[in-house]
Structures are given as structure tokens and as C-alpha cells.
Image: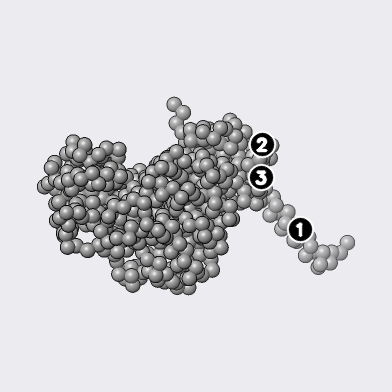
Amino acid sequence: MKIRNSERCIFKWLYILITVSVVYGRYASWKSFAIYTNGVIYTVDPFDDEWDLHPEEAMVVNDHTGYIEYIGDNAGALQYHTEFSYVHDLRGNTVLPGFHDVHMHPLEAMTELGGGCSVPSNTPPENMLYNISQCKPRNDATAWVLGHGHSIEYILEHIDNGGRPPKEIIDEVMDTNPVIIMEETSHSVWVNSKALKLAGITKDTPNNPGGIIMKDANTGEPNGILFENAGNEIMDLAMKSFKNLDEMNYDALLLGLEELRMNGITSVCDARTYWKRNHHEAWKMACDDKELTVRAVLGLWAYPHMNDAEQIQRLKELYTNGYNKNECFLKINEIKVYSDGLLESTTGAMLKPYVKNLHLPGLDENIGMNYFTQERLQVYFEHLQAFGYDKGFDFHIHAIGDRGVEEVLNAIERTKVSGTRHRMTHLEIVNQRDIPRFQALDVIADFQVTGTYTLPNKLYRIENVVGESRAKNFIPVKSVEDTGAAVTLSSDWDVSSLNPFISIQHATQRGSQSISVKSAIEMRTINAAYAMRQENEVGFLSAGMAADFVVIDKDILNIPINQISTAKVLLTALQGEIIYQLDKK
């Protein structure tokens, strides 16, 4: 029988298809898969409103790509088994997407710049003489003595009670070396006379933008307490004296990354990358050395005392939407900027005066202060949220008081461009009229509830500062969530613990502002992935998604709420690679 050309063409294509199928089949048999069985796997799938009600049993990860091939039951997963695959028996343990933390300070948290000098937080300053006397310079790296840990509340109480200027307390035991002790929230420092002299700070020194030099009520001399950016400026001066700053930054970052792995955290935002201290170079070095074990977004610090045009140009030069060395998960595409200060020190920007009055210089109205005014914020938004052909920073904005919150929302509204994912963080006091604006303006609301001060039984501390009525809805997570806005939870480590289970538990224990465990998990996973512009890659578990996940020893959706914080991480995986496994010995 004679075969026509058309039939020859058909046979030819059939032959090719059969050959490809055979070759692919053999290739598939060579594939290596990590097969996880017998688990309680919560996908946190944003397309499934009931993901919490029907956990899956098994998951298959392609070892070559690090992507998920399958999620379902054991039988389906075991079909991927080949001689090159291996099976992990989860033994009934729980699997969740890798946790995100979109506001933390992993390098600062682990730095040894303080030389191990730590003072207690719950002690009056006059009782710290011995602790301070034990502080030393860090070897021969610098003459500066750096410490940390005290509570600004105890310092302010000491001053209110007529105590001597705080600088004199340090001078009594250490007057030769310049000393800086950073308080526990990092929003003020306590220094001695030597440090003030080297910084050129006198009774005639004015406050720079975003900073306050506290002065003695009788003499007008600086008393040794520097709030907000005034503390940052003197710390920058000390940093310039360190001979091995880059090495110390890198060592601190590596220690921080280890802590992240142990806590099941696979994606982070460094919420204050001091580029003048070369913090960003430490992250790049981790990429170069293949040591970066998280997906990281750096928030470049906007220095409030720097010339705007000069700073804006420098920030543009630092932008990168992907540091590609060694296929590293590093982006420098956020700006961290402060609107205001803190409630406890009455530096948070408020619409009406504080109940408490510290009589801080330059704050006569007692409504707090601004690092960046609304008008200045608008300049930075206009120049940095979209520039070049396809570049643009998302802004990560610290706003604590209701005036600070409102001014930031105003600035965003007046400069808004399509596609931005600006994120406001802390949001401790929010005026009721501004609650719906997060959703309306597509602004992400980021809250921290890990610290015990955020729980109802500690509310009296805030009431003493702003009054009972304004403190009623302190940190309004539930109110903002109910509007449909994108909401995230983060730690602000090392101000609070980076343990994600504590934040999830506390989020459900806040009275009228409590949320569900399900919502809290979403805020630490898929919502935060959206904030980092990676919701199509990670944040939930599904075929085709990167295998960033954590295995934990408790099903936190089905245990008493007060036990959630006791959950332990057994295994952490980034892009399919196991980066941490609990030693069972």
C-alpha cells in the first residue's frame, strides 16, 4: 500500500511524540523528589476560604527546582516515588508555609558593637552604677563604650523626681571614655559628658529634624538623654571610629540568620538598613558567600537630618529589585522612614496633647514630634515610589500617634500612583476616621503584638500617657482587618521576641481587638508575602509554589490558645532545601 505524503507527515509526528514521551518518562524516573507523608498540612491557600478546615496529608517537592509538585493524600504523593526520591514521615506533625516577618532588625539584634555591655531594663538609673562600671570598649576597635537595655520610663521617672542629670550617673564611674547606652526600644540613648563633648552638643545646640536633646530644667545644659534622631546621630559618630565595622556587621547578620532559621522564618524585611553604616553590604556579602537563608527585602533608612535632594539621589543609586549573585533572594526596594517617635516618651505625633507632660524642649504643645513632616514625606514619595523605566520603592513608614498616622495617609493620598504597596507600621493610636483609609488607599497595615505591653492587662501604661479614651482601641488590628485592608503581623525584633507563635497567640488575646488564629497565621504568611511582592512565589503551599515551609510540633489551629506560644519548630525549608532541623538528642 502506497503511503501518501500527508500520512508520512502524520506518522513522523507520531514517532516524535512517542519518542518524546519515552524520553520524558525515563527523565521523570530519574527525578529526585522529597516526599512528605502523614502530616497535617495547612496550605493557607488564599483561593480556599476554608483551608483551616481540611488540612492535607502529604506534599511532594522537586529536589531539582525547589518547587512543590503535589499536595494531597499519601497515596497520591507516593506515586512520585522513584529510586532517587526519599520519604519523610511527618509523624502527624503540622506543616505551615514559612513564616514571614516584615518588620525586624536581624543585624542590629545580634550586633556585638556594644561589647556585651548590658544594663537591666527594670532598674532605676542610680542602681545601675555597678552595671555601667563593668562596661568596656570593644577591644581596640574603638574608644567608645556602647551598651544597651535600660528603660526610658525609669530614666524619666528619675528626672521627674528631681534626680541628678543622668549623664552624671555615668560620669561617676566612667568619665574618660565616651559612653552611649541605648534604651530597650532604640528610640533614645543615655550618654556621658565625654560623649556629649565629642559630639559638640552644648546648651546652645538646637534640635535637628527628628531629634530632641533633653536639657536640665534649671541650667539648660544637656542632661545626657538624646531622643530619637539625636541618638542616631551620636551613634553614627561612634560607628565611624570602629576599625572593623564591616566585619562586625557581617558576623552579626550571620548570627541573626541562624535565629531566623530556628524560628521557622523564611522571609524578612530589614526594617532599618543603615546604609551609611554599610548594613546593606553585609547582606550582599551573605549572598556572595551563599549564606543567605531567607528571602530578604532591605528597607533603606531615610536620614531625617540629610539634605533631601542628595539623599533621594543616593537612595535611587542603591535600589535593586534583585541582587543576582548566586541566585540570591535579596532585594533592596523599600525605604524605611519615620513619621514620629514613641508614646512612652511623648514623641509620637498626636492630634491632641498628651495627658503626661515631660516638658521636652521644642515640644511646647505636648503633641509629639515629626521625623518627617507630611510635606517632606510627599517629596520622597513623589521622587522614589516610581522612577526610571520600571523602578520604584515601596515605603515602610513608622507611624505611632494618631497625628502621625493621619499625616502619612494624607501624604500617600496626595501622591498615590498605581501599583504601590506602601506599608505603615506600629499604628498604636489611630483616629476612628482614619480606620477605613487603609483599605481605600491600598495601604498595608502592619502591627506588632508580641510584647506583653500590647495585652489588655497592660493597657494602664498607655492610659497614663494618652488618657483612657484614646487608649481604648490601642493597636486596632481587628478594626482595620474588618475594613478589608491588607494586614500583617511582625515582631520588631529585637524590641520583642521574634518567636512567631507568641505574636499569633497574643493576637487572639486582645479583647475587642482580638482576631482568629486563622487570620493571625494569614497575616504571618500570605498577607506578608503580598507586602513583599512575592505572593505568586511563596506565602501558601500549592503545586507550582516554591517550597518554603515549616514543620512544627503542635497543630496550633486545634489546641487551647494559651498553648500556641509553646509550639516548637522541628524543621525549616527554603526553596525545598532544609535549612534547619531540630536536634532530637
Outermost residue toward the top?
585
Amino acid at circle 2: Asn
Q: Is residue 124 above or below residue 318?
A: above
How far apart marks 3 and 1 lie (CA) works out to 45 Å
Position in image of residue 467 (x %, y %) = 41, 49
The quadrant holding residue 303 is bottom left
Residue under label 2: 74
Amino acid at circle 1: Leu
Identify which residue, 258 or 367, lies in the foreground.
Answer: 367
Could you tell me how many numbered marks the image carries? 3
Front: mark 2 or 3: 3
How far apart marks 1 and 2 lie (CA) works out to 35 Å
Residue under label 3: 50
Residue under label 1: 14
Identify which residue, 381 or 110, lies in the foreground.
Answer: 381
Amino acid at circle 3: Glu
How far apart marks 2 and 3 lie (CA) works out to 21 Å
Outermost residue toward the left?
176
